[in-house]
Structure formats: structure tokens, C-alpha cells
Image (spheres, helix red, strand yellow):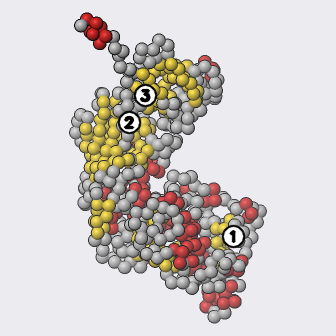
Amino acid sequence: MNQAVLEKTSKPAPPPVKHHLCFRLVDLQNNPIRDRRYTLEWTDVGALAPSRREGTSGADGRTIKITTQGQVAVSLAIAPPVGGQCRPVGQSVQSKPDNKLHVVTVRLTFNATVTTAPQSRNHCETLTLRQGKQRVKYVINNVLTVRNGGEDHPTYLTNLPYLIVDVATLEVLHGGQSAGEPAKFFGSRTQVSTVEVPVDGVSEVGIVLGAAAHGGAENWRRNARSLVMYRVVPEAEGLTAVIIKEVSGVPSDSPIEHLICTDGEGRQRTAVLNGKVWAAITRSYSMADIRTWIGGNLTLPKQGGNLSSWYQVARPSLRQIDWAEQHGKISAQQAAHYREALASSSSAQTTELPLRMQLAWSELLEPFYSGQIVNIPAPTRKHSQGGEIIIAPLDLTLKLQVGFCDNAGEFTETPQADVIAKNHPYIYMMLLSACAEAGVSFVEISGMWRPMLGSYLHKLGDALDIVAVDAVNDQLEKFNFKNSRVSSNALAKRFSTLLYEHRYANSAQHIYKFDEYPHGSDGRHWNHLHITCMSRKPLDERDMAGYIAPHEIGSLTPPPVFPEMDHRGVERPWLVR
């Protein structure tokens, strides 16, 4: 019996449970610190000698993920920016079990560079270590469906951008992997959430949501009082969760400062997200913004592919002539000649007076951002009365369907002119460029910024829904994006291609069920073309003030007339020449 007891007690102990750890090196703005040499060192449970791993931080600032035998202390040492020995950060971190977040953020209080650290080989930055003793997480329980056009439609918050921010310093505690990029909510149709974010030592935490997080730090930092929302003082230990309930209905009369507050105490706080908050977090662009930011001209490719900043039309319409005279593009005497030629029955005489002019983006975008809506068909309607936006220099009419912005009007009480101003300029620049190049003179629009319907792209103001396209002088019927194949209509195909290939296009989100492009259409895009812009992309050089196309440098003479007289009819066979 004693022998049996001895054999039982001499069985080896079970191996220690595996734990994991990874460090992420960031600067004070939460930008990843890449290409920095580091050393990780720890001693596994039961081991006599320490384990050691060396490497260089990746593009996301992360070290390798290590696995330890048991929960042990792991030390990190990093090298100065220009070389030398790795120096310890002065604090070790416990490795984490499988069910815990294993990434620990290491933030440099002083990010030494070659310039700031001439004593580089002996210099060691001061680091702030957040290992997650205090954590914050935001959860949104969203509205499942909303009524629009007499039908129930789903609404989604997955992939909605966000930033977690230190309220006092406006330091970004958690964002996307690249510098300045927001993170994105993940989850289901009914509920989305952020990750759990380590906030050790932060006195108050807030979140920047949606278009505000997507747009750029200068805007939300300038308006931090209203855009850093749902602020909480984290609990001294553990997870503090903020549960936000999205609600539909008429917006509250409460001031925005009250609506973006949280209620409750302890580990779970509550808040409300309604239409008034959606409107507050989505920027409205003004003509002052456009003039300051987008200082260049419309540029179009000529025959051979060279860009030109001269917009040219062989047979200008009366409204093009009138606009050119009113804006100083031509003199009164020249305008009279154009009108005389237009009135003449001789087409040969008309082609001898092509209209050439440079069109500033501020001139083309002004109707969108100064509320120029005409021919309103339903003026007594409470919201979304419809109408037309006239882009006179392009002889272009943009028809707004009655009800095109019902969602925004009903849930935010935003007038239709202000809804138009919440769409990003890039989406309109895409549209106008495609119309100018394809010879389109009519576009019908059914949707733009809408905060509580469909995907996050419309909520950001990055998307536009188009239902019809036409050219006044073409040989084809108006094309309706409704169960009709784009390939069957030359104008629609060219127009769609130009939008898909535009420099600001988010081509992966160019969706129409009956086009020829790859997309994961869910079947709801059978009656409109959905286009999306990449609003985070920097302004292209050609759209900046002072841009001159390379082949036009040194020449102030307008190039030959575009497009009819330079034999581009092959590319636009639908136009009458």
C-alpha cells in the first residue's frame, strides 16, 4: 500500500498553461513606430535559464507574439533610433492567458530621433506602458430597420469608423493600424462594439464617431467639445463598458452637449445615439472650405491621354454661353457672336465658334454647397422636396428625386440643401468629371447622406445613388439603372467606367447588380448605381491651385476644340456629330 501511495505522489506535475504577449510601439499620436530593434526576455515556469527573442518592430509597430510556459514577467528593451544597444523600458509585463487581450501598448513619451537624440547610443526614451489594468469598451445597440419610401429597410453600423481618445490631451488611445487611420466597429446587424482599449492612467476617455473620426484629426480636435463624445471616467480596475442605444424618431430638443453625455456609474454606463447626434458628427462643407482646399480646375484627358485644364465644347448651349459671360470667361461681344451662331441654322457655322474655358472646382461645386436647388416639384412637402441642381458650364442637370433625403430629414430634421452639403466634395467631383468627359447632360439622383439607412458609407457622406443618365444630343434613350444591363447602352457603360476608374473612386464599393464589375452586391442594388469616394485620400495634385498639365507648360494658348473636332467620336459613338 505504501508503494502505491509513493507511485501516485511521484507522477509529474501537469505542464504550465501557455500564455502569450505582444508589444505595440507607438508615439504620442498613436502612430506605429516601425523598424525599431527590440529584445524580449522572460523565464518560463520551471525553466532554469531565461528565453530571449530579438527582432524589429513591424509596420504596425508590433513585436512578435511570444508564447510563455505559465504566466511570467516579460521585459522589453528597445534600441535608440539610430542604433546602439537595446535598453530596458524599466517595467516588465505579465504574459496573458488565451482568453485575454495579449497586445500591450508601449507609448513613447519622448520619441527620440537622430535630430533630438545626438547621444543616440546612450539615449533611452521614457515610455508609458498600458497593459490593460483599466480598460474601456463602447457598444452600440442599433436600430434594426427604418421606414423609408413606404417600406422597411435595414441599417448597419458594422465598419463604422471610431477613435478612442484621452479627453484631457486629445491623444488617440486606439485607432487603425496606419497613422491617423480610425479603427472600425465590428459585430452583427443588431450590435457592434469597439475592442477593449487599455486606458491605464487616463483620467477621462471619450470616443470620436463616424464621419468625424473618418475625416481627419484637425477637424475633430478643433471641435473636440462636441465631437469627443460619450465621455467616461474609467473604473480603477477592470473593464468600463459604455452601452449606446441608437434610437429613431424625432430628434430631441436637448442641446447636443447633453445628448453626448453618459449616464450611470460603475462598470456599465449608458448613452443614446439619435438623429441629432448623427447630424452633429457629420461635417457640413461650405464654399469657404472648397475655396481654401480645392483650388484647382477641372482637368480632362485629350486625345492621346494628355490632361488639359481647358474645358471645350464645339456647340455651346445658351446656358453655357450665358454662364461664361456672367463669370468673365468671354466678353459681351464674344457672347453675342456665340448666341448668333447658336441661332443660326447652319451647323457648320456653329462649329467655327467652339467655347473654350477653364473651370475652377469652386465654380463647379458652388451649386452643391450654396443651396442652389431650382424647379422644386413638391415645395409643400416637409422634407426632401426634390428639385434640380444646374451645373451650367457643363450644360448638366442633376435631378433630385422627391424623397431623395427623407431619412436625413425625418431623423435629423436637416433641410435638403444642408443634406447635400454633408456629402464629401470628392463624390461630386467624380460625378462632374464623368459627366464632362462622357458628354452626359442629365443625371437623376435618389440618395446621398443618410444617417440611419443602409451601410456606413452613406452615413459618412461618401456615397451617391444614381437612377438614370442621359445626354441631350445623343442617339440613345435615357438609361435607367433598373434591371437594365449597362453593357447594352454605350453612354451608361462609358459613364459607369469613368466613375469606377476615377482617382477618388472607392471601386470596391461601386455597385449595380447589372454591371460588369466585381462586387458583393446583396441584391438591393438592382434599381440604382451606388458609387463611393475615398474621402481619406489626399487631394490629387491636378486639383490643387496652380496646377499646369506637363504638356501645357509654357503655353497659354487653348488646345484644339474638344471633343468633336479632334475626332474623338469613336469614343463617344452615341453623340450626334
The relative height of residue 124 versus residue 225 in the rendered view (above or below) is: above
In this rendering, position of residue 244 left or right of residue 222 = left
In this rendering, position of residue 472 left or right of residue 221 = right
Picture residue at 50% right of the left edge, 43% below the top: 180
Q: Could you say which quadrant of the image residue 493 lies in?
A: bottom right
Depth check, front residue: 559 or 369: 559
Which numbered disc, 2 or 3, marks the residue that appears first in the sequence?
A: 3
Depth check, front residue: 344 or 270: 270
| CA–CA distance in space, label 2 to label 1 | 52 Å
Q: Name the residue under label 3.
A: 20
Q: Name the residue under label 1.
A: 302
Depth check, front residue: 358 or 201: 201
Q: Where is residue 121 in the image (x, y as percent from the top left)?
A: 63, 20
Depth check, front residue: 411 or 244: 244
The relative height of residue 166 versus residue 469 in the rendered view (above or below) is: above
Which numbered disc, 1 or 3, marks the residue that appears first in the sequence?
A: 3
Which of pointers 2 and 1 indicates the residue nearer the eye?
Answer: 2
Seen as rendered, the residue at the extreme top is: 2
The local crowd at label 2, few if under 14, some if 14 to 19, many if 20 or more residues have their Cα within 10 Å, is many
Q: Name the residue under label 2.
A: 197
Judge whether residue 389 can be spotted in this image.
Answer: no
Q: Which amino acid does label 2 sit on?
A: Val
Q: Which amino acid does label 1 sit on?
A: Lys
